Image (cartoon, rainbow, N blue to C red):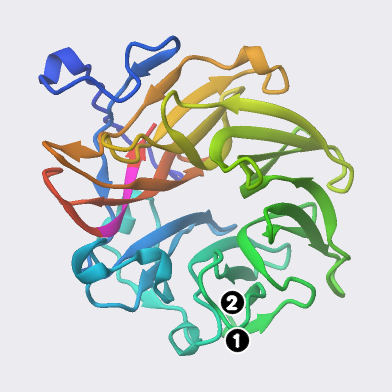
Amino acid sequence: MKKTICVLVVLFLTVSTIGIPKLQGQGSAGISAALAKPIQLTTNTRYDRNPNLLKTADGKYWLFFTRGRNPIGVRGVSGYDPDADNYDIYYKTAGTVGGLKKAAEHLVPGSDLVTVNTQRDIAVVQAADKSIWLFASSGYGVSSDQSIFCYRYTKTTGWTGPTAIAGTSIAGHIDALAVGGVIWLFYENWPYSLKVMFWNGAGWSTPVFVLDKATLPKAIYEGGRFYLVWAYVDMDLSEYGKSIGLSTSTDGTNWTTLGQIAAWPGATNWDPVLVKWAGAFRLYWAPDTGSGGQVIATRTSKTPLVPRSWSAMKQLTLAFYGSESWWDFWPNASKTPRCIVYSSERNKTRTALSDANIWMIWQ
């Protein structure tokens, strides 16, 4: 972490050694388990979700997440649906990722006053001038204004915004990158059409079409190339989360789609994110296995543009206890140090469904 040396402890367990039922999908070709020991980063009775981990130029770590306004916080209790909640935006800061566990929470000023947009999804980058750009969208939650909104932070002015971005009406899920002084904003436009636009210092570009029948875009930039992962959706065929796909571009405006790179057997596939560590690309995503709950899974490739190069799929979390299951979802990967943060509805002892909090796994 940062400039210090850390000891990362990851507990790898097999089904046989911990005496639990078979994992969802286990026994299928290319499936294995590498269960990890997660660390809880937020604790609140409301619904915390969709974390973003940002390392700024000064070496500080910022954890952003959204918190539901409904005090119930537990999915299914009194009909509570987290996808229908409205959200405020919070953040923590620390000198190390581990320090985020005890760091104080801060409300992004003004985010609690927004009533026209649910602000369920967020994406965060640091611009070349060291300002932080925080984007928020409805994630298709019911909103009177489904534009993407932008908050900005500088050390001199603090937080400003939110300001709606023109041309982003009916925007769903979002992601953002800062590359070479340019901010790239990826989003899906209803119905499930991925687009990208960029900030050139004076204004936003015209949106560029990437592909249809896709949701939940997440992008990285490595070696002069954009890599964009997404979940496949075909409304005409009622196919939702059939697989995780990959598209790529060298300039951000001309895109080639490689197609499927992951599909968990017997599950729908959601929330992909890509990161490159030590020469290998690692995909994380959240298969919803049904009775086995929604879990975090991963696989790797040194040549991601070759579909057959991807390794066996591994399950990292367990999302059920007895007959009760929950959602582990929305992984977000940190390049340094090697870890992921994600949302989970598990309780502290992993024995029951609870309100959602933000968790972390070292990798």
Which image quadrant for residue 27?
A: top left
Front position in the image: 292 or 355: 292
Horizontal side, residue 265 vs residue 16: left or right: right
Q: Residue at x 83, y 47 (%)?
A: 252
Tell me if residue 70 comes above or below residue 351 in the rendering.
below
Using the image, tell me which numbered label, if any, was put on residue 101.
none
Front position in the image: 75 or 93: 75
Quarter of the image for the C terminus: give it: top left
**Image marks 1 and 2: residues in contact by CB distance under 8 Å:** yes
Residue 94 visible in the current orientation: no
Residue underneath mark 1: 157
Which image quadrant for residue 246?
A: top right
Asked if the stretch drawn in magenta spans residue 194, the answer is no
In the image, the segment drawn in magenta is 356-360
For mark 1, give the secondary structure.
loop
Which image quadrant for residue 64?
A: bottom left
Q: Residue at x 32, y 38 (%)?
A: 290
Q: Position of residue 353 (x, y in %)?
A: 18, 52
Circle 1 packing at 10 Å, graded few (<14), some (14-19), many (20+), is few
Specify the amino acid type for callout 1: Thr
Residue underneath mark 2: 153
Quarter of the image for the N terminus: give it: top left
Tell me if residue 41 comes above or below residue 116 in the rendering.
above
Horizontal side, residue 206 vs residue 77: left or right: right
Front position in the image: 171 or 280: 171
Specify the amino acid type for callout 2: Tyr
